[in-house]
Amino acid sequence: MDRLNPGVSPTVKKTWTIRISGVVFIGAFLVLADRIPEEEDHRPSRRPERLVLTWAGDPATTQAATWRTSTAVKKAVAQIAESTDGPEFAKRAETLPAGTVPFKSDLGESHYHSIQFSNLKPETLYAYRVGDGFNWSEWNQFRTASNKAAPLSFVYFGDAQTDIFSMWSRVVRTGFTFAPNAKFLLHAGDLVNRGVRDAEWGEWHRAPGWLNGSIPLVPTPGNHEYGTEGGGRKLTDHWRTQFTLPENGVSGLEESCYWFDIQGVRVISLNSNEKLAEQAVWLDGVLEKNPNRWTVATFHHPVFSAAKNRDNPKLRELWQPVFDKHKVDLVLTGHDHTYARSNLMSGLSVRSEESGTVYVVSVSGPKMYQVDREPWMQRAGESTQLFQVVTIDGGRLRFESRTPTGLLYDAFELRKRTNKTNELVNIDVKSPERIGKNPTG
């Protein structure tokens, strides 16, 4: 034993730490420590970064990619080939020009580049990379969707918003481990806290690592993606610069209000921040001509809020009758920083077998609020980071909500019935509801 430190082995010395104005003393060593300046931490270079996959066209035959570099890259290119078991695919890769736009954020200037690969084969694995012809990203892979109804899964995230790199990374990465073959990652708004801040977007891109360049994203904007850039309140310029999305929505809401079909599912993104009445008319038309067996809608503000002081009556008045009319299966939202899930709903806060719509509010980041328990809630939760895996196979949809530790927090199935509305089967979970767990506010 060490005579000077009873109970401490001579081979194990105590380490003490003192911090004074950014100077850290660890044991007998002096370490100069300070936060990396945002301009340095998120400075672009000639090397491609912030690479994301999205769709602007048919998921079976197209794939869009968007990325960022420094302004030194004036012209960008991409290479693509059908993937092979060995490296020979690279020799057969086709080189294609990408579009380039200048962008100025609060941290400085950069260039964003985008390309839409087209005339692809359905259900085919492709390898691709992006760059300037000399400085390249790694080779990434994606698989195109089927051009007909087929089983699929996707992962749904509520608000990431704050402490994104530090606290959200584990959620999105664990989500991938439970759905490694997910066709897309759906983000229900408030991806960041202040949409005008480039450092926050840098964290958001950094947190998933390589996932964003391999699994397409389906984002919908929240209120925190809106700011006062250039005067009035509007969607941040970051949005359309970094996401290449469909432009088939309401005029003026391009790439925030849109729809696409994938493997027998119609996916609809609505922008719940503005032009609600115009979108209700548009939505009715999109659903009137829907040939798919399943329909999933996403937007930020809930139809049924998890807190009394956060209700959205105007949105509910305008949009829920359209969901009821067309029997939309699943509505995925965020905003309330809690978890709440309905049974089958129709009308104003009424459980009903006549509609078949399930409404969900969820949160994936660490910012938490309280739940006000309401009769419409089948399951609720506070102070719990969550991701949701949705799997659709034929006439069944399975929904699982899990915590970052992998704990199953909520689960249900929707089952299609001939000439009837959906049957909802709630699945027993072992975990108790987490209510009153010291929300962070």
Image (cartoon, grey):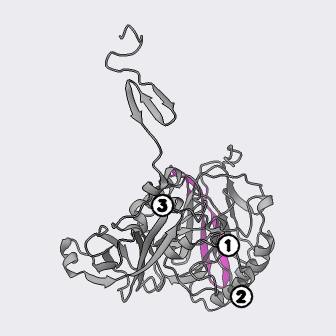
Label whose residue precedes the other's in the sequence (1 or 2)? 1
Q: Regarding mark 1 in the picture, which secondary structure is present there?
A: loop
Query: Mark 1 is on which residue type?
Result: Gly
Q: Main secondary structure of the magenta part?
A: strand
Q: Nearer the viewer, mark 1 or mark 3?
A: 1
351 or 290: nearer the eye? 290
Identify which residue is drawn at 36% across, 11% down.
Answer: 2
Label whose residue precedes the other's in the sequence (3 or 2)? 3
Q: Which residues are magenta?
A: 402-428
Residue at numbered disc 1: 231
Q: Nearer the viewer, mark 3 or mark 2?
A: 3
Q: Quadrant of residue 437?
A: top right
Q: Position of residue 189 (x, y in %)?
A: 61, 67
Q: Is residue 3 visible?
A: yes
149 or 419: nearer the eye? 149
Q: Position of residue 359 (x, y in %)?
A: 68, 68
Identify which residue is drawn at 63% across, 73% down.
Answer: 230
Q: Quadrant of residue 438?
A: top right
